[in-house]
C-alpha cells in the first residue's frame, strides 16, 4: 500500500471573496464533503482550505509523489486550483472549460484526480513544500461567475501519496 499523508485533525475554510464553503453529506469518502458555491455578490470567487489551527503543512515527504483530490461538478467554466506557501509561493493549475486536466470530467460525478507534485512545482518553483499555507485554494477563472450556469464545485478526499494506483 502506498504511503499517504496522515489526516489533519481539522481544517479551516476561508471565504476569500464571496465563495463560502459548506459541508455536505453527499461525500465520496467518509461522512462529509465540501461544497464551494458563489454568493452572487461578486463577478469572481475565491476560497481556501487551511490546517485547522493555521499551522503550515509539510509536503516534502511527498515531493516525488502526488496531490490527490476528489472533485465533482457539472459546471463547464474554467477555474484555478492553487497551492500557496508561507514565503509567497503560489502554484496555479488551470482547469480549462474544454479540457479534462488530470482526468477531471464535468459530468456531475465524483472524480479522483492525481496531480504530480513536480507539476505543481513547475507552476511555481518558489513554492516552499515545507510551509504550505493554503493546501487547496479554489479561484474562479476568467468571466463573471454570476453568468455561468451551475458554478458549484464539490471537493472531498484530499491527500498526498507516494504513488497512484492506475485505473484499468
Image (cartoon, rainbow, N blue to C red):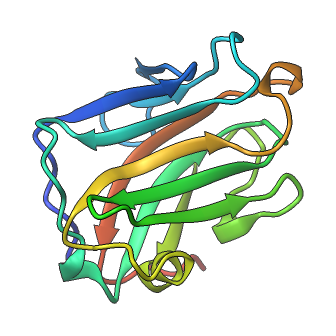
- Quadrant containing the C terminus is bottom right
**Left of 164 or right of it: where is 46?**
right
Q: Position of residue 158 (x, y in %)?
A: 37, 52
Q: Residue at x 21, y 64 (%)?
A: 131
27 or 23, nearer to the observer: 23
Q: Position of residue 84 (x, y in %)?
A: 39, 58
Q: Residue at x 89, y 22 (%)?
A: 147
19 or 124, nearer to the observer: 124
Asked whether the viewer can see residue 132, the reply is yes
Residue sticking out furthest to the bottom? 64
Q: Residue at x 63, y 30 (%)?
A: 45
**Left of 112 or right of it: where is 97?**
right
Asked if residue 136 is positioned above or below residue 19 in the image, the reply reads below
Asked whether the viewer can see residue 2, the reply is no
Q: Residue at x 41, y 68 (%)?
A: 67
Numbered-mark total: 0
Asked if residue 28 is positioned above or below residue 84 in the image, the reply reads above
Q: Position of residue 161 (x, y in %)?
A: 30, 74
Residue sticking out furthest to the front? 88
The image quarter containing residue 86 is bottom left
108 or 50, nearer to the observer: 50
The image quarter containing residue 11 is top left
**Left of 45 or right of it: where is 69?**
left
Q: Position of residue 61 (x, y in %)?
A: 18, 81
The image quarter containing residue 1 is bottom left
Amino acid at each position: 500500500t502506498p504511503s499517504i499523508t496522515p489526516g489533519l485533525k481539522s481544517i479551516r475554510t476561508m471565504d476569500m471573496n464571496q465563495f463560502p464553503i459548506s459541508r455536505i453529506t453527499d461525500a465520496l469518502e467518509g461522512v462529509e464533503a465540501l461544497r464551494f458555491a458563489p454568493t452572487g455578490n461578486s463577478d469572481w470567487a475565491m476560497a481556501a482550505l487551511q490546517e485547522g489551527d493555521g499551522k503550515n503543512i509539510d509536503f516534502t515527504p511527498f515531493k516525488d509523489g502526488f496531490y490527490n483530490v476528489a472533485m465533482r461538478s457539472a459546471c463547464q467554466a474554467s477555474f484555478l486550483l492553487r497551492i500557496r506557501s508561507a514565503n509567497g509561493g503560489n502554484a496555479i493549475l488551470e482547469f480549462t472549460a474544454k479540457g479534462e486536466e488530470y482526468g477531471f470530467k464535468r459530468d456531475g460525478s465524483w472524480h479522483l484526480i492525481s496531480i504530480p507534485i513536480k507539476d505543481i512545482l513547475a507552476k511555481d518553483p518558489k513554492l516552499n513544500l515545507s510551509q504550505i499555507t493554503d493546501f487547496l485554494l479554489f479561484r474562479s477563472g476568467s468571466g463573471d461567475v454570476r453568468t455561468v450556469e451551475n458554478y458549484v464545485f464539490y471537493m472531498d478526499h484530499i491527500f498526498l501519496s507516494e504513488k497512484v494506483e492506475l485505473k484499468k
